[in-house]
Amino acid sequence: MPFERPSIQDSAEASSKLRERLFSGDLSPDDFLEALMEIDQSTPSHDAAHATAVVLESPEVRARCVTGKEDIFGYANLLSLSRFHAGQSEAMAGGDALPEFEKSLAAALEVEDPGYSEWQDYVRATVAYFRKDQLTLERSLDVMPDGANRRIIANLLQGLKARGDIDYRADYRT
């Protein structure tokens, strides 16, 4: 049965249906994670990300998806990404995004792959921005390679220094 991309309103229902298919054996854990990623990515504003994160955080879903150390990456990466996108959606709406970004960081830190450190550094820097921690942002720039994420962090730092306060809508740009 192919996956159909849901509307924003249907994302929670679609995520729940995928969960049911996972537990019925109709969907493998890998296919489940891939389908949840499609829901997370279904809108440019990532409004569906919260629904995917809620389903992923279920202890039963984690137990089904993570049966060994080799399964941590796919699960934790998607959880981190979903929470990060939920944080972005919350920040763009003017809400309190810090808890979402902190959950994203916690999930990212579960991955013990040195190749994943760039994402961990980016999420850590984003958390620092929402905590108004300029020193951590500056240190993050010292270790981040050139690219879009580094430019975003530089812009976040520049905005924070200029205003002394956060304004993610104004500062988040590549």
Image (tube, grey):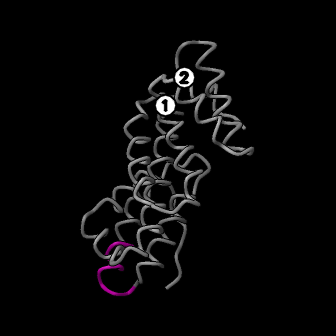
> Going 64% across and 27% down the picture, which residue do you hit?
171
| Labels 1 and 2 touching (C-beta < 8 A) | yes
Q: Callout 1: 10 Å neighbours few (<14), some, many (20+)?
A: many
Q: Secondary structure at mark 1?
A: helix
Numbered label attached to residue 76: none
**Residue 19: in magenta span:** yes
Question: What is the x, y in percent for residue 157?
Answer: 62, 25
Q: Residue tagged by mark 1?
A: 128
Residue type at mark 1? Ala
Q: Main secondary structure of the magenta part?
A: helix
Question: What is the x, y in percent for residue 162?
Answer: 64, 13
Residue type at mark 2? Gln
Magenta span: 18-26
The quadrant in which residue 60 appears is: bottom left
**Residue 70: in magenta span:** no
Depth check, front residue: 138 or 61 = 138
> Going 46% across and 78% down the picture, which residue do you hit?
30
Number of on-image labels:
2
The residue most toward the top is 163
Question: What is the x, y in percent for residue 169?
Answer: 60, 29
Q: Secondary structure at mark 2?
A: helix
Q: Earlier in the sequence, mark 1 or mark 2?
A: 1
Left or right: 129, with 149 as reference point? left
For the C terminus, the image quarter is top right
